[in-house]
Structure formats: C-alpha cells, structure tokens
Image (spheres, coloured by chain):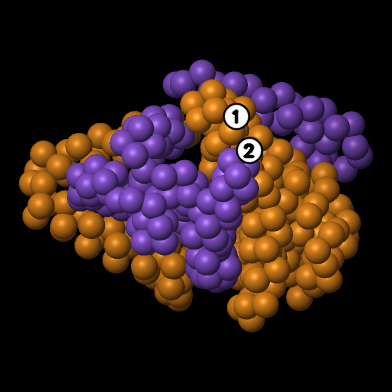
Chain colours: A purple, B orange
C-alpha cells in the first residue's frame, strides 16, 4: 500500500471514529442502524463490483498501450485535445501511474492544454471507475446523466487551460 | 426513528436481482428483473474476457486475473471502512436538511455546497462513492450528486496536495484549477436539465417508508 493511500485511510478512519462517537451518544441505537446500512449496501455491491473489476482488468489487458506513446508526437490544437480526452478516459489506472505518465507526455512535447484535458478526462470520464464503482452503486440513469453532463466539459477544460496559459505568458 | 427504519428493511430488497441471477441459489427462482446497467457490465465482461483470450491468450487472462486480485486486496479494507462511514452519515444527517440543501430546488447554492463537499473528500473511489450514495439516499438530487462527484474527481484537495502539486508543479496546478473550478457546478446545472430520474440501485429508505 502506498503512503498516500495509507494517509487517506487514516483520515477516513479518524472521521469514521468521530462520527461513531457522535452517533453512539445520540439516543435510539444509531450505530447499529449505521452498521446495518453498511452491511446491506456491501451485500448488494460486492457481486456487482467483482464483475466490474474483472471487466476493467480484461479491458486494461486488451488496451493498446502503444497508443499513448504514439499520441505523444501530436502537436497542440483541438485534435490533440480531443485525442487526449479519449485516451484519458481509457487510462485504467490510479494517480500513482497517471502522474508519471503525464510528466513523460509533457517532456515528450505534448502541450499543456492536451495534458489538462487528459487529466480532466481521467477524472470525469474514466471508464474503469464507471464500471467498478459508479454503475454498481449509482445505477445506469445516474451514469447516463453524469456522462452526458460532463462529456463537453472535458475538452472545454483543455481550451480554457490554453487560454489561461496564453494570458499568463502574454 | 431507528426502529422505523428497521421495519422498512425488506430482505428481498437487500438481495438484488443481480445476486440471484449470478449466484446460482438453491432457492426457487425469484422474479428476475435484471437492470440495464447490470446486463451491460456482464455483456462487457464476456466480450472483454473473450477479446483478452483471443488477443493476449491465457497469459493475458492470467495477468488480468492477478490484476483484479491485487485491486480487490487493496480496496477491501478501505471499502469496509468507508461503507461504515457512509452508513453513519446516512443515520446522522437528517434527511430534510439534505433535501433542503441539496435537493432539486437548492439552485446553484446547493450545487456549490455539493462541490465544496466533494472537493474535501480524501481518498479514492472507495471513499467517495459510498458517500455519494449516502447523500443521494438522503435526498440530494441528481444535479447535486453530479456536482459532488465531479468536484471530487477534478478538485479533490488531498489528490492535488499529495500527487499533482509535487509532480506537476505550481503553475500547472494553478492553470488547471482555474480552468476546472467552475466545471462541477456547470456539470450539475446540465445534469438538472436532463429529464431522467435518479434510480438508485437500492431504493432509498424514505421511499419504503412513505409507501
């Protein structure tokens, strides 16, 4: 386990413990209701999540990783932003792999707007996160609405970043 | 209040259609009502598994299985903890307050509150999604939920401090943040205009209570 995830685990643990104390001091057996909630949700989530994890792993295995390398030659412009958005959505990884990849991409000459679009896309559209978490927990309607609301914002963030960078360096 | 909740917990709800369809249970088959999302993921699993076997052979399948096992081992302790956290949030936060602050009529103010809350959640998806579900079950509307999740995805303070700032540098972070800061609220506004009901996989407790 990485240091970062250990730190997050501790933070979540402290918050959970604090809320548990608050709940235990309220009348009406609230902690047991909370544990029942957690158990119930876990039971409905685990089988769906297992299927999602397997599907995401197979997809990660099939994905042509050379695409990311080939894309590094692309010059700036809206084509680069759209391509970066597409690749960002398919990058099946956590931040520990993502950020080193982004550094490598920028060193290979990829522009800042494209890199920002790549990161935004990995955040908002990541296919693996939709499969493993969002679909099992929130249902298909939420996924459809959220993706429809976000899909145009990903390239927008790239364009905005380009303008801000131009303005900063003007 | 807790007793009321306990009554409305119907056991048939806790066992989803998916579970009954995929864990071959010896019990008589229940009415099968497999959701669209579940069908899609299973179809994707079959297709990607077949594609993996065809393109990468048994070695690829084995690698994918090991990757899955590693992922599962890593997220399990965090998931258990965050499920308990989400359960505590569900019992502690009063529903009428959540629907007032984050309901369909909460306006851009609700979207802003949801965005700030989303940016404050530390950790990976194992932390954010149970919380997202909890505030959704407590009465937040789809726009607030989209704003919350988008803010966690784009503006999560912990990820910026731990990863982005040290690796990408201050200028990159500044430019990206200025470019992204309004997007969660914007996504929430767009989401509220899409006429699709929020059907959470497990019906919110309040629905069971009122019917």
| Category of crowding for the residue at label 2, using alpha-carbon neighbours closer than 10 angstroms: few (below 14), some (14–19), many (at least 20) | some
Q: Residue at x 81, y 59 (%)?
A: B110
Q: Residue at x 86, y 52 (%)?
A: B94
Residue B211, x across and y down, in percent: 76, 75
Foreground pick, B45 / A89: A89
Residues behind callouts 2 and 1 on a single chain: yes
Q: Residue at x 25, y 34 (%)?
A: B66
Quadrant assignment, res B84: top right
Q: Is residue B131 visible?
A: no
Distance between mark 2 and mark 1 Cα atoms: 6 Å
Residue B83, x across and y down, in percent: 61, 41
Report the number of numbered marks.
2
Q: Is residue B176 above or below residue B159?
A: below
Residue lying at the far bottom in this picture: please name it. B195
What's the mark number on residue A30? none
Residue A124, x across and y down, in percent: 52, 54
**Secondary element at tag 2:** helix
Q: Are marks 2 and 1 in contact (CB under 8 Å)?
A: yes
The chain to which mark 1 is attached is: B
Residue lying at the far front in this picture: please name it. A170
**Secondary element at tag 1:** helix
Residue B27, x across and y down, in percent: 40, 62
Q: Residue at x 28, y 58 (%)?
A: B45
What's the mark number on residue B170? 1
Q: Is residue A144 visible?
A: yes
What's the mark number on residue B174? 2
């Amino acid at each position: 386990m990485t240091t970062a995830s250990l730190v997050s685990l501790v933070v979540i643990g402290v918050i959970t413990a604090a809320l548990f104390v608050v709940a235990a001091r309220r009348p009406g057996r609230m902690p047991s209701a909370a544990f029942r909630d957690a158990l119930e949700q876990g039971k409905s989530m685990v089988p769906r999540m297992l299927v999602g994890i397997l599907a995401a792993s197979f997809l990660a295995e099939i994905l042509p990783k050379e695409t990311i390398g080939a894309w590094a030659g692309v010059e700036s412009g809206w084509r680069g932003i759209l391509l970066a958005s597409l690749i960002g959505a398919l990058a099946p990884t956590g931040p520990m792999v993502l950020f080193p990849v982004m550094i490598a991409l920028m060193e290979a000459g990829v522009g800042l707007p494209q890199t920002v679009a790549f990161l935004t896309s990995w955040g908002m559209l990541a296919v693996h996160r939709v499969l493993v978490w969002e679909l099992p927990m929130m249902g298909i309607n939420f996924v459809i609405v959220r993706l429809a609301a976000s899909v145009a914002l990903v390239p927008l963030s790239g364009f905005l970043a380009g303008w801000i960078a131009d303005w900063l360096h003007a | 209040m807790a007793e009321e909740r306990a009554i409305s917990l119907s056991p048939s709800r806790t066992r989803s259609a998916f579970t009954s369809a995929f864990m071959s249970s010896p019990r008589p088959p229940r009415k099968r009502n497999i959701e669209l999302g579940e069908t899609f993921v299973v179809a994707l699993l079959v297709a990607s598994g077949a594609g993996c076997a065809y393109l990468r052979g048994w070695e690829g399948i084995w690698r994918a299985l090991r990757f899955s096992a590693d992922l599962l081992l890593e997220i399990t302790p965090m998931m258990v903890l965050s499920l308990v956290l989400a359960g505590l949030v569900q019992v502690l936060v009063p529903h009428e307050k959540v629907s007032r602050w984050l309901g369909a009529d909460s306006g851009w103010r609700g979207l802003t509150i949801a965005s700030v809350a989303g940016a404050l959640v530390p950790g990976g998806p194992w932390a954010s999604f149970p919380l997202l579900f909890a505030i959704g079950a407590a009465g937040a509307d789809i726009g607030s939920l989209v704003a919350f999740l988008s803010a966690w995805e784009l503006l999560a303070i912990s990820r910026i401090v731990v990863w982005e700032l040290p690796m990408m540098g201050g200028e990159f972070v500044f430019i990206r943040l200025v470019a992204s800061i309004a997007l969660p609220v914007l996504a929430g506004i767009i989401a509220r205009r899409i006429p699709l009901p929020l059907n959470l996989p497990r019906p919110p407790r309040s629905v069971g209570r009122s019917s």
